[in-house]
Image: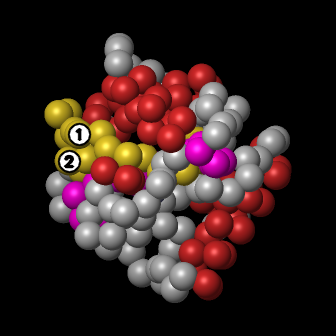
Amino acid sequence: MEQKVSIVSRAEWGAAAPKKKESLKGSAQRAIIHHTALPSCEGLKKCKDHVASIQRGHMTDRGFDDIGYNFLVAANGTVFEGRGWGVVGAHTKGNNHDSVGIAFMGNFNNDTPSKEAILSVKQLLQSGVSKGFLHNKFSLFGHRDLGSTECPGNKLYAALPQLKST
Ligand SMILES: [Zn+2]
């Protein structure tokens, strides 16, 4: 069963052009889940501005070529295009060349991810598989599985199995 997920495009949130863009070789083998560890946003306009400010932070303060994540999801389930499918991200040091990085917007050390956000990311993963951007036997990780970080927060980390259940 293919799920439809609608994505707010870079043009729609007013993304700056990337300084550089590197394509992934083949389909991503892994999906790596993050949280932004920033306050969550509400409403389309505020969330678009929030994504744009994350991009500015990544490009200006951290010197990335673009927003680090491939996708971001807001609490109401709206998905925002980051680097998008098939592009090498900057989200998990040493693990960016065979993965897709998806960030839940908010801080999930204490907050529980919404059902809407979980469902949207599940649909996004399914659509990535159906379009061939994500391997059909992809592995799912939290950032903390691959690096020394608390990301994606305890409550989101505990919810990861829900992203793969059918
Ligand atoms: Zn992370």
The image quarter containing residue 113 is top right
Q: Is residue 60 visible?
A: yes
**According to the image, label 2 marks what residue?**
29
Residue appearing at x 54%, y 68% in the figure: 67
Q: Nearer the viewer, residue 44 or 92?
A: 92
- Label 1 to label 2, Cα distance in Å? 6 Å
Relative to residue 14, is residue 162 depicted above or below? above
1 or 2: mark nearer the eye: 1
**Residue 27 image offset from top left, x and y in percent:** 21, 49
Q: Quadrant of the N terminus?
A: top left
Q: Characterize the local packing of mark 2: few (<14), some (14-19) or many (20 or more) Cα atoms within 10 angstroms.
A: some
Who's the residue at 33% across and 62% down the image? 147
Image position, residue 103 (x, y; %): 52, 50
Image position of 92 (left or right of 11): left
From what the image shows, is residue 92 above or below residue 84? Answer: below
Say which element carries label 1. Answer: strand
**Magenta range:** 96-109
Q: Of the numbered discs in the image, which one, if any, rests on residue 139?
A: 1
Report the amino acid beneath label 1: Ser
Q: Along the horizontal axis of the image, is 92 left or right of 135?
A: right
Indicate which disc, 1 or 2, sits on the residue closer to the N terminus: 2
**Residue 62 belongs to the span the image colors magenta:** no
**Marks 1 and 2 close (CB-CB < 8 Å):** yes
**What's the residue at 26%, 63% (across, down)?**
95
Quadrant showing the C terminus? top left
